[in-house]
Image: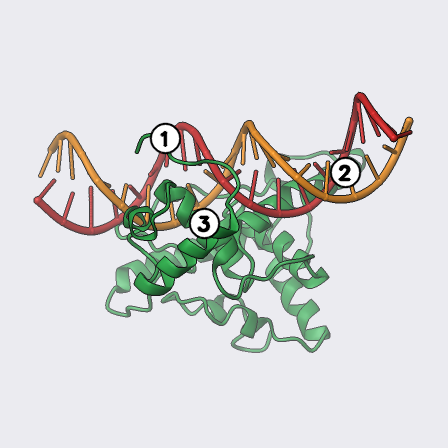
Chain colours: A green, B red, C orange
Amino acid sequence: MEGVRKGMWTPEEDILLRKCIETYGQGKWHLVPLRAGLNRCRKSCRLRWLNYLKPNIKRGQFSNDEVDLIVRLHKLLGNRWSLIAGRLPGRTANDIKNFWNSHIEKRAAAEAGRARAQKSITRSNILRPRPRTFSSPRPEPGLVTADTSQSHDADECTRWWSNLLEIATDNGDGETGLIHDACNKQQDEGDDVKEDFADFSIDVDIWKLLNFGDDA
DNA sequence: AAAAGTCACAACCGCTGTACA
DNA sequence: ATGTACAGCGGTTGTGACTTT
C-alpha cells in the first residue's frame, strides 16, 4: 500500500482497530486495515493489538517474581521472547524484550563482569540455545498440541526438553539446575510453580521431566 | 531555565516458517 | 517442486518523558 501511516497511534485509530477486532475477531491481519478503515499496514495493526489494545494486558512495573521468572526462562530459552511471554500472563513479548534490554541485560552484564573476575569462562559453562532443528511438524515447546497420536513427535519433543533441561541443569560448576532452583524456591514460598506452567500444552509429561510429579 | 544525557516504551524492519495453489 | 502470500518473531530504531549538569 502506498503511503501507509507510520509512527505513534492516535486514540481514534485505536478505537477503529478495537472495533474491527471486536467485530471480526483476531486473525486475517491483511484484511484488518481495510475492515477498520485504517491507513496502516497489517503488521502495524497486529502489533498494536497484541502489545497494547488486547484485553488483560498487564501494564506497569514487573514484580520481583516476574523478573525472577524472566531471568530463569531466559537462561533456559534464550531470546525466545514470545515463549517467555507465554509464561507470564498479561505480559507481551515486546514488553519483556524491552524490559530485558533496558534492565536485566545491564544487570546481567555487570554481574558477568564480576563473575569474570572470579572465574574464567570455559566451553562447558556457557549455556547456549540449541538450534531449532525438528522433524516436521516442529514440536515447539509450549506450542505443541496435545495430540497423542503423534508419538514420534512426542518422543522428539521429550528428547528436546531433556536436552534443554540437561543443559540448564548441568552448567558445569556444580550448581543446582535452574528448574530445580525454581521448584525449591517456589516450594519454600508455598507457591505453586506447577500452576504457573499449567498451560504448557505439549504432549510430553513435562512434570515428570521437571520432577514435579514425584514431589522431588 | 535550558541544554545534554539517559531511560522506557512503542513501533518498524527484515527475516523465517507455514500453508496453499 | 516451486512460487507466493501471510503470520509471527526477534532485532533495532525512534520518540517522548525524565533527570542531570
Amino acid type, mark 2: Ala
Camera sees residue A13? yes
Out of A128 and A6, give the one closest to the viewer: A6
- Element under disc 3: helix
Residue A129 screen position, x and y as percent: 50, 43
Helix, strand or loop at label 1? It is: loop
Image point (70%, 68%), residue name? A185
Residue A23 coordinates in the image, percent (x, y): 33, 64
Disc marking residue A13: 3
Q: Do the residues labelled 3 and 2 touch (CB within 8 Å)?
A: no
**Closer to us: C3 or A148:** C3
Relative to B3, is B14 on the left or the right?
left
Q: Which chain carries label 2?
A: A
A136 sits to left or right of C21: left
Q: Residue at x 32, y 56 (%)?
A: A27
Secondary structure at numbered mark 2:
helix
* Precedes in sequence: disc 1 or disc 2: 1
Residue picked out by circle 1 = A3
How far apart in space, not on screen, are marks 3 and 2 (Cα)? 41 Å
